[in-house]
Image: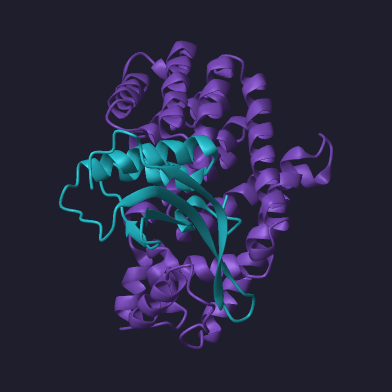
Chain colours: A purple, B cyan
Amino acid sequence: MLEASPAALAAWLSCVLLLLSPVGDWRIRPLVLALAVLGLLWREGWRSPALWWALALLTGARVLLDWPLADNHAYLLVYWCLALALGVREPALLARNARLLIGLCFALAAWQKWSSADYRNDVFFLTTFLLDERFENLAVLSGLSYEQIDLAREYLEADPRLPSRAFPFELPLGLWLMARFSTVWNLAEQSLVALSFLVPPGSRLRCLRDPILLVFCLCTYAVAPVVGFGWILLAMGVAQAEASHRLRKAYLATFIVLIFYGEVPWSGLLVDLFNLG
Amino acid sequence: MFASTDVGSARQVLLLVELADGSDFQIDLVYPYRDTLERARGLPSPDWLTRLARTSFEALEDSPEIRFPAPPQALRIEVWRILAAENTLNTHGEMVTSARFPLPDDWPRD
């Protein structure tokens, strides 16, 4: 696949990501899986616009069926399948759409963060680390015990009609630092990704777009348990990247690293290794 | 994309049956009714709150074991969010929206 065009590699990776991270409920999922297998195994099916129109329809139906609960990357997947349907045989069009999708996606994400007071003041990450079970081991690595996490959840999810009370214990410095770092890092990195993908051709910042996107995926999805989102971004990244072997290898390698992020519970292993919690 | 604490999953929806003696009786929804609650929590528009009320009435009809201490009169739906203070994480609740739905005329229960 390294010899394939960026558009072909992007389409192939998109079929792989639909297999690794199938979407929808029982009405949608079997059809998406069947089409992804068909795309990979049947006469280079990933090059067929018809395949991507069908997948756009199915992923769009999934968003409608889940309304209004679909995650943001569910919408991005629909747009990306549409972009592939329109551009899988027109690499320049696909590259332009991929660049715009990444740029706009990150611009909107960064704008949401800049404009959200409880994001800027670290409250978002503090409460996320405490409440979201997927970050539980990370919270323990920052210095909390599991008992404290349970206490914090009980407090943060108490009956909202109760009068205001004080937080039940003092949060460790490690958690504050982790929240501050996460806030600043995400704001800066996502703003930079948006800028580098949206600046006009010829700008020096534009040369940074691939390394920045790869760093974003390698850092973010080591912690955030939504590797499916990362795979979509990487497939779009490949589509718009220059036709260089080194870049394609970097995108492919990152795609593979994300598979292991999804399968290896590294934060839990660290907690066990250091006997924390 | 990870920007605010005010997301559907962090909100709380209270389903309060108003009784004739002036008190409230809180109910909860389980599968298969809970799906509507989660959608209404994410988008608490009048339309979704009405759907949630309808679903709650269906759930009550299917739960004859629930006995109210006084005759039920209406269902009040309250959607709340929890706000945490900077530096302390001390919380207080803030109501996002609420709506009141009289019991249907053909309500079969005492």
Q: At x 39% / y 77%, what residue is drawn?
A: A149
Placement of A106 over or under A67, stated as above or below: below
Q: Quadrant of residue B91?
A: bottom right
Res A18 visible? yes
Quadrant in which the C terminus of chain A is drawn:
bottom left
Q: Quadrant of residue B9?
A: bottom left
Q: Position of residue A264 (x, y in %)?
A: 33, 59
Q: Position of residue A209 (x, y in %)?
A: 69, 45
In percent of width and height, residue A245 lies at 57, 37
Image check: A90 left or right of B106? right
User: Farthest residue in the left direction?
Assistant: B65
Q: How far across and how far down the image is residue A54, in percent? A: 43, 16
Foreground: A12 or B63? Answer: B63
| Residue nearer the viewer, A184 or A203 | A184
The mark tally for this picture is: 0
The residue at 48%/47% (across/down) is B100
Please tell me whether residue A4 is drawn above or below residue A113 in the rendered image: above
Q: Quadrant of the N terminus of chain A?
A: top left
Q: Residue at x 65, y 27 (%)?
A: A97
Foreground of the two, A120 or A14: A120
Name the residue at 33% across, 59% down: B25
Query: Is residue A223 rendered to the left or right of residue A188?
Result: left
Query: Is residue A138 found left or right of A263 in the rendered image?
Result: right
Residue A235 visible in image = no
The residue lying furthest to the front in this view is: B21
Residue B91, compared with residue A44, is above or below; it is below
